[in-house]
Image (cartoon, grey):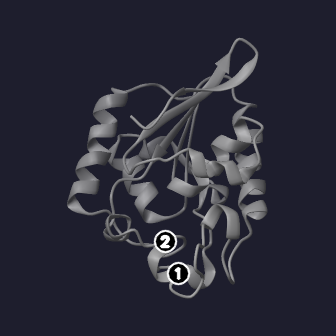
Amino acid sequence: MLWLIRHGETEWSLSGAHTGRTDIPLTPAGEESARAIGDELAGHEFALVLTSPLNRAMRTCELAGYGDQAQIDPNLAEWNYGRYEGLTSDQIRATRPGWQVFRDGVVGGETIGQVAARAHDVIDRAVQIDGDVALFAHGHILRILTACWLGLPPEDGKMFVMGTGAISTLGYEHESRAILRWNS
């Protein structure tokens, strides 16, 4: 089973700014939600723990109690938003009316296909492991990873809203890949 764990709150997640590669810290509330993740997981044993190289994900992993066993996987870094980094959707729509990240992409960053390729690499690594795998990462990469897990186009990640500090699980219903728990 894949456990998707989105990092705790940051100032930019609060404002709705696209936070790709800017390495900003968790807010105090974000640190508290990271500790709550640890309480909810209650020492669950994972065969593999992977984390994004960005501080907000690594700190969430650490505060949840899994920092000692975590391995950094660059494929779990958030979408590189290029020129849209730090901007809200409304700010982007001021110059690109009707813009949607999953449909229209970004300027000067990664394509959704490039993000999906990274997500597939993470999935390929995780399915080789015998046991549960924890992925500490970010909203958009985890949403795209979910779409890829389900065999959907990466653009369908738009349907899987994931809050900060959320835990979701992906696994199987009989032989079919499925969402087992979402955004709790």
Q: Is residue 96 above or below residue 4?
A: below
**In the image as oriented, which residue stretches furthest toward the top?**
174
Disc 1 target residue: 92
* SS of the residue under disc 2: loop
Q: Residue at x 67, y 48 (%)?
A: 156
Q: Are marks 1 and 2 in contact (CB under 8 Å)?
A: yes
Mark 1 or 2: the one toward you: 1
Examine the image and state in which quarter residue 68 appears.
top left
State whether residue 40 is above or below residue 78: above
Residue 78, image quadrant: bottom right
| Kind of residue at disc 1 | Ile
Q: CA distance from mark 1 to mark 2?
A: 10 Å
- Quarter that holds the C terminus: top left
Q: Earlier in the sequence, mark 1 or mark 2?
A: 2
- State left or right for residue 68 relative to residue 151: left
Q: Residue at x 35, y 42 (%)?
A: 64
Q: Residue 111: x, y in percent?
A: 74, 69
| Few, some or many residues within 10 Å of mark 2 (<14, 14–19, 20+) | many
Look at mark 2 in the image and give the residue it sits on. Answer: 18
Residue at image coords 58%, 46%: 159
Give coordinates of residue 74: x percent, y percent: 64, 60
> Dot 1: within a 10 Å radius of its alpha carbon, few (fewer than 14), some, or many (20 or more) residues?
some
Q: Is residue 87 above or below residue 5?
A: below
- Asked whether residue 134 is in view, the answer is yes
Q: Nearer the viewer, residue 55 or 165?
A: 165
